Amino acid sequence: MLSYQHLYHAGNAADVHKHAALALVLDYMTVKDKPLSYIETHAGRGVYDLGAPEAVRTGEAAQGIARLKSGFPSDHPYIRALERCQNGLYPGSPAVALGLLRPRDRLHLAELHPMEHSALKGNLTAPNVRIYRQDGLALAQSLCPPEPRRGVMLVDPSYEVKAEYGRLPKWLAGITRKWNVGVVMLWYPLLTSQAHKPMVQQMKKDHPDALAHEVRFPPAREGHRMIGSGLFIANPPYRIDAGLAGLSALFERGA
């Protein structure tokens, strides 16, 4: 959906959940001295100024990273990713990944929105990063299985088009057939409408060994329909449960 710009929502509670979980996964995956591939289907602009009028207007960062950051231990990989982002900017998931991955790892980032794509190209420049202006779901299909075969994929649609809830289970099943060793993380919002439930139920049926991790939080403002954040993780890394349990506890405390 070409109208979506994440700056209005950057640093919100869902971003904290998504990016902290991604940081845990990448931290685990880079323990082995073997290169890996990172694929992101909806990359946005990569980094965000939380003082920009768009971000301030919604107040979502104030209810997200500003409220929750103090609850993380100083050695958490998410905190390391935040500290590596320059000029006080907030790292989106591409910057979290680039900050935690190694020069020999390969990053493939898709962004279809022309302005966001242009900003992404300016914000993330590294020899091991390749940026595409094309549909991210189609790109992922064309890249899988990637080289190196070890790796992580983050799927982070806007869900502005309701049909995405219906198409994603079949798409995910196709990706995991082509790339049966890849860790595939699919984010979804928890809305008051409960629109995510049939999608998650189908994915659990298709992937009985996968992991679904959800956290809940208060609406960012009156009338806001998002009340939580979910991640469906196919081929979850061994022992990632402990790190995710820590995330659950942080959100339950609220800081």
Image (cartoon, helix red, strand yellow):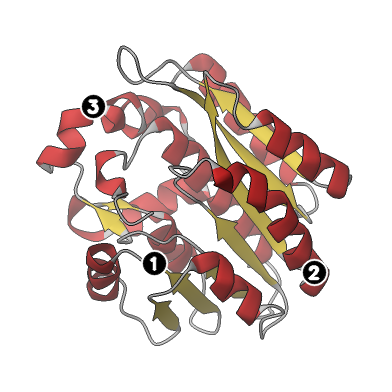
Q: What residue type is labelled 1?
A: Glu
> Rounded to the nearest whole Å, what is the CA distance between mark 3 and mark 2?
39 Å
Residue 188 visible: yes
Residue tagged 3: 59
Residue tagged 2: 181
For the point 34% across and 21% down, the residue is 220
* Other-residue count near label 1 (Cα within 10 Å), few / some / many at <14 / 14–19 / ≥20: many
Of marks 3 and 2, which one's residue comes earlier in the chain? 3
For the point 51% across and 43% down, the residue is 18
Q: Which amino acid does label 3 sit on?
A: Gly
> Rounded to the nearest whole Å, what is the CA distance between mark 2 and mark 1?
24 Å
Establish if 104 lies above or below 66: below
Of marks 1 and 3, which one's residue comes earlier in the chain? 3
Residue lying furthest top: 222
* Other-residue count near label 3 (Cα within 10 Å), few / some / many at <14 / 14–19 / ≥20: some
In the image, residue 19 lies at what x, y percent? 48, 47
Residue situated in front as seen by the camera: 65 or 76: 65
Residue situated in front as seen by the camera: 60 or 201: 201
